[in-house]
Image (tube, rainbow, N blue to C red):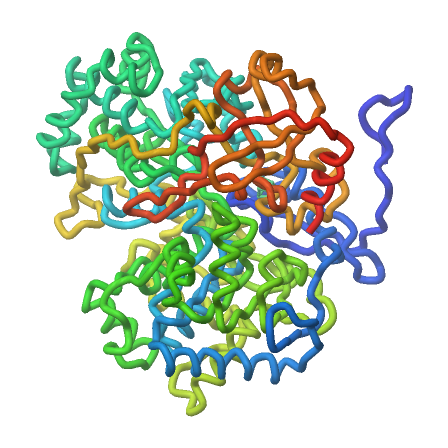
Amino acid sequence: MLFGRRKKNPIKIADKGVVEWKYAACGYCSTGCSIEVGLNAEGKPVASRGVADADVNRGKLCLKGIFEHELFTSAGRGTKPLMRARWHDEWRPATWDAALDTLHDEIVRIQAAYGRDSFAIISTGQMLTEEFYTLGKLTRGLIGTNNYDGNTTLCMSSAVSGYKRSFGSDGPPGCYEDFEHTDCLIAWGSNLPEQHPIIYWRLKEAQEKRNFPLIVVDPRVTMLAQNAHMHLPIRPGTDVVLQNALMHVIFKEGLHDQRYIDANTIGVDALRAEVEKYDPVTASKICGIDEDTIRVVARTFAKAEAAMQIWTMGINQSTHGSDGVVGINNLALITGNIGKPGGTSLSITGQCNAMGTREWSSCSGLPNYRLLEVPEHREEVARFWNVDPEFFPKKRGMLQTDIYQAMEAGQIKGIWLIATNPLSSLPNTARIRRAMEKLEFCCVQDCYQDSESAQYAHVFLPAGTWAEKDGVMTNTERRINRVKPVTLPPGEAKPDLWIFNRVAERFNREGRVKFPENAADIFLEMREISRGRLADISGMDHELIERNRGIQWPYTAEQRQRGETPPKGGKRLYTADGTFSFPDGRAKLIPLPFIDNNEVPDEMFPFWLNTGRLIEHWHGRTKTGKIGNNNKFSPIPFIEINPDAAAELGIRRGEYVRLVSRRSDAVAMAMPTQRVPKNMVFLPFHFHDCANRLTLGLLDPYSRQPAYKQSAVRIERIADQAAAAKLSMEMRTF
Ligand code: SF4
């Protein structure tokens, strides 16, 4: 096929010989693009393409999605169960029975010796929802440890916590269609063009039609900031101060929506009293945004007919992450911008199925946003699963970040890591290594055998990835979409669901708790237990979901019976007065005093270290580092450094530098650019043994999410550039 320039050097697309296309939702980010994988005559996946009639992506894919079919045959896949007596011994191949028996026996041994909660389980945002539900049933209903969490604590727990504090439940209230209705958009710490390219395309298309004001709050001149009407280069970690100042102006100038506040919220007096302290002059000295800009943004936002806010890690990954989300919700609530077209506070989620784990994994409680702290919820789920309600803990246990500190302190003796790689993803790598070395037992279940964390495993369970499995995922806008098996896992690797069911058999010898074998049956079970809940999916099934290219929850059995077709489900939450998830139906306006507790630059470490993502790569590069077309554009770690700062340090473009923090050091290539201010460097977090050697990662008091983006470093010139280049190449490998 030829396209582009017709005569001179036209671009040729090779004919891959596709004979069949198979449907799935993309397995990287939470945008939730519908994708088709092309199989050739031998049944080999050879191409990927966007699905034209899917509402989310309308035929488009980003750089990661386009090459996603290459995942199935990428290097480093686990193909056999492995075992060893000590983590530094050589691996030896094992049978599935031997590996699963060892996992079961070690959980039982450690729990008997040290107590039920001494064994931890940490999963991911990458599995399918039926797998999350099954793991939750196994963990909460049979194994019984309360130290069970997902790696979504590293990206989304501040959003979850903020939604719960403001609205009484997790669950993003808006959708992508809101871009088409909004009259003003504030993006807080979100670089959509690189992180969620197809959501950005939806935003850009809507903005080109109606040119609503786009205001970007970010310390760095990101791609989104470059395309904004206003860029507010905020001092890291001070979003709450800016939010309070915006509310100060809105209340002072009578721009709030009193009717909406009276009908839908409690706590306005306490909020007004707190924001009274944040006049623009005072606030500007803390957050670095000048007082006039604060006033202009407050007026623009509050006077818009419909105004929305989106955010990503710039808010969540902070010691004030949960407060930052509550501040966004406060702003939305006092201006009546929840539950209406174009008026929303929409957390842009991270991983492809972070939402699925939030809804169904039972990590933070029990399925479908039920809470361990509520006796009726414990009773209801225990009856449904046929377990003793007294077996459930009465409150949530540790989150992931606290679990590693408990390992370090010797309270947790064993761990089962599922599709997560803490040695790459957690801050302060040296501390995580110390914690892992203290374990008596570690099982790693992953589709890649060469993840850094597998170094510490005694048992390795090879799992299938993405469309080697069957089930559903939920995207940022609550849209449940289908993933169908395109091919089989390699060698002896098995879908995660198969592994959970085999572990469950070992804890459930008498068959008291039912564990359906296939994803369609599990989904039917999930929809039963969803009836009447916020995330009601009782009107959906696998076939209907695929036919509609995803359905947003809630979509109830009653809606289906009424023949509401096509079943697009619930575009928005909280659309009527008094429908928030607290018992009184009202949202909470919560005052947010600011406490400056970050590590900040000083004489010894004079630069802010800001970490983040690149369009080519996915998280720890376990996947994209092995896909040629993703890796070749960003093969090595680099820093963005301001040209003036580089000149003062005598650093030239392309030279390697050493970054030093109070934790450790790392080597990266210097790329001078005006995208960062003179006292900041930006370092992509994807590369092995690099960014997280430096980060401190103080924890948010509510969400326990680490502050990855607020650490201090110094930069040193390296005399031996050849040695530094060699080290940098090692950081790109696994
Ligand atoms: Fe996949 Fe996200 Fe890219 Fe869509 S935007 S193709 S979901 S990585």
Q: Is residue 297 left or right of residue 477?
A: left
Eyeballing the image, is 539 above or below 4? below
Q: Nearer the viewer, residue 461 or 563?
A: 461
Q: Is residue 340 left or right of residue 712?
A: left
Q: What residue do we see at 29% from left, 62% from top?
A: 396
Residue 73 location in percent, x, y? 76, 57
Q: Nearer the viewer, residue 454 or 480?
A: 454
Q: What residue do we see at 64% from left, 65% from top?
A: 464
Quarter that holds the N terminus = top right
Quarter assignment of residue 532: bottom left
Q: Is residue 637 left or right of residue 269?
A: right
Image-quarter location of ligand 1: top right
Eyeballing the image, is 570 above or below 146? above
Q: What residue do we see at 38% from left, 62% from top?
A: 409
Q: Is residue 9 left or right of residue 477?
A: right
Residue 41 location in percent, x, y? 84, 59
Q: Nearer the viewer, residue 336 or 319?
A: 319
In this orientation, does residue 555 appear? yes
